[in-house]
Structures are given as C-alpha cells and as structure tokens.
Image (tube, rainbow, N blue to C red):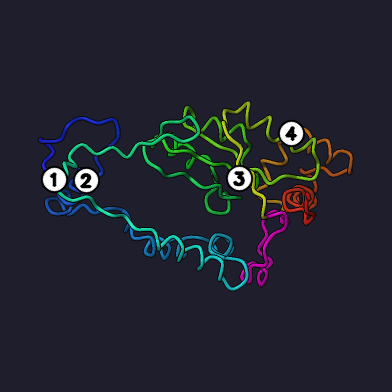
Amino acid sequence: MDPSNLPERTTPYYSLYQREIFVRGSQTGEFPLFNTDPEELEKEAKKRLSEGGWNYAASNAGISWTDRANREAFYRWRIIPRMLRNTTQRDITTELLGHKINAPILFAPIGICKIYHQQGELPVAKVAEELNLPYCLSTAGSNTIEKVGEANGKGPRFYQLYMPHDDELTLSLITRAHKSGFTACILTVDTWQLAWRHNDIATANYAFYKGFGNDLGWSDPVFRKRLKEAGVDPEKDPKRAGEMWIDQVWHGKAHT
C-alpha cells in the first residue's frame, strides 16, 4: 500500500495501519500487543480473566446448540467481490438510526463489565466514541447510566432494556438513558429469565447476588425507593440489594 497515491477520505485507511505494522516489525522489531485472530483473542482472554469472568462471558445456554446455529447462519453470508472496478476510494461509513457511523459495526450490550475490568463499561464507551461506532449499554451494566453517557461523550449510543415488571422503574431507566444522550432503546424480548448455563450453575457464578456490579440499578431513584420500602440498605446489605435489583431485570414472569 503506497500511502502517496491515496485520495482523502473521512474514515481511516486500515490498510495503512497494516502497512505500519509491517514496517515497524520489519525495521525495528516492534510487534502488535496481541493477535487479532478472534480465536487467539479468546485464548488470551481466558488466560487473563478470572474463572468467574471467563465463565460469564463464554457460557451459553444448555449445550450451546443455539449459539452454534447462530454462527452457522452467519457463516452462510458471503462477501462477493466486484472485479475490475476502481476501489481506491473506499467508504465503509453508513447511517444507523440517524447517526452517520464509520463502519457497520456496533459495540453490543455486555452486562456487568466490572467482572472483566475495574472500570467496567467506561473505557469501552470512550473507545466507541473515538471510533465513531455506536455503544450499547446493558440494563445489567455495572456503571451508572449517567457515567457511561459521560464517558461516551459525543458518540452515538443506545440503551438495551430488560423490561422490569415495575412500570415506574422501567420509565425511570428509559428517562435516565434519554437524558444521558442515549438515542434509541433496544428492547430485549426473549430473556425475562436467566438461561441455564452449565459452567455458571456449577460454580454459582452470579456476581449480582454477591452484591457486585449492581451500580446501574442502585443509582436509580425509583429502585432506591423500592429498597427503602423493603428496609434494605445497599451499603449495609449489598447482597440482598443485589438480589432485589437483578430479580427485577430477570424476573421470570412473562409480560404477555
């Protein structure tokens, strides 16, 4: 890739990044910090995360047949190259829900990120803004909605809602997200109860019940009111408060 013959564009030329890696490695012996092969990244994550963090991230429901089916369905999509066309001026930007983003990629909503890193969702939200890619915050997040919105700055962001049976609480969560700059609500309709995940079950791997990672719920004024009504102080009894919060998220009762 000759950097001198490239026309200007608004998004990065990732081929130049590839060239930079090759030049540095060849001339100075400086190599990337990690291998970008997804399977290699997964191996590295398993080495670095705690057992609980790894199990929560890697476990699937049952014996993973649905996960396998989803992957197989995705594999059936193919990129068909168009030959003998001028591809010098490439543009992978697209528009999603009124936002012009740098690539058709989103940061999926991942719950309780503090089991992976002490800052939880905040660094990821910051990087999403830097890349101009949408960040999606989970209702099971381990930072407050407001802090995540602040970390994401001017980036596009969406809020994923596990809908509680408490309508006042639901409206409070959505309102907080709207005020914090989240411009769309991603409503999850198939997870009103936590799936049976063998590795998590075998180790009772559920940080919420241990009183950890419940910041998004505990910071909500309506939920704080519910705690007070129940006589539960999250500072003195975080495990009971954690139960109350996450049992609102995955409440086990159908809405229909």
Separation of disc 3 and disc 2 at Cα? 33 Å
Report the front residue among 127 and 76. Answer: 76
- What amino acid is found at the position of numbered circle 1 in the picture? Met
Measured from the top left, where is residue 87 in percent x and y? 19, 42
Measured from the top left, where is residue 65 in percent x and y? 56, 71
Q: Is residue 5 left or right of residue 96?
A: left
Please give the name of the residue rendered at 59% of the width and 73% of the height, measured from the top-left corner: 63
Pointer 1 residue:
1
Separation of disc 3 and disc 1 at Cα? 40 Å
Pointer 4 residue:
171
The image quarter in which residue 121 lies = top right
Measured from the top left, where is residue 138 in percent x and y? 60, 45
Element at label 3: strand
Report the front residue among 14 and 201. Answer: 14
Separation of disc 3 and disc 4 at Cα? 16 Å
Element at label 1: loop
Q: Is there CB contact under 8 Å for labels 4 and 2? A: no
Element at label 4: helix
Separation of disc 4 and disc 1 at Cα? 52 Å
Q: Is residue 93 left or right of residue 186?
A: left
Pointer 3 residue:
138
Q: Which mark is residue 65?
A: none
Mark 3 or mark 1: which comes first in sequence? 1
Mark 4 or mark 1: which comes first in sequence? 1
Q: Is there CB contact under 8 Å for labels 2 and 1? A: yes
Q: Which mark is residue 15?
A: 2
Please give the name of the residue rendered at 10% of the width and 36% of the height, measured from the top-left corner: 5
Please give the name of the residue rendered at 72% of the width and 49% of the height, measured from the top-left corner: 249
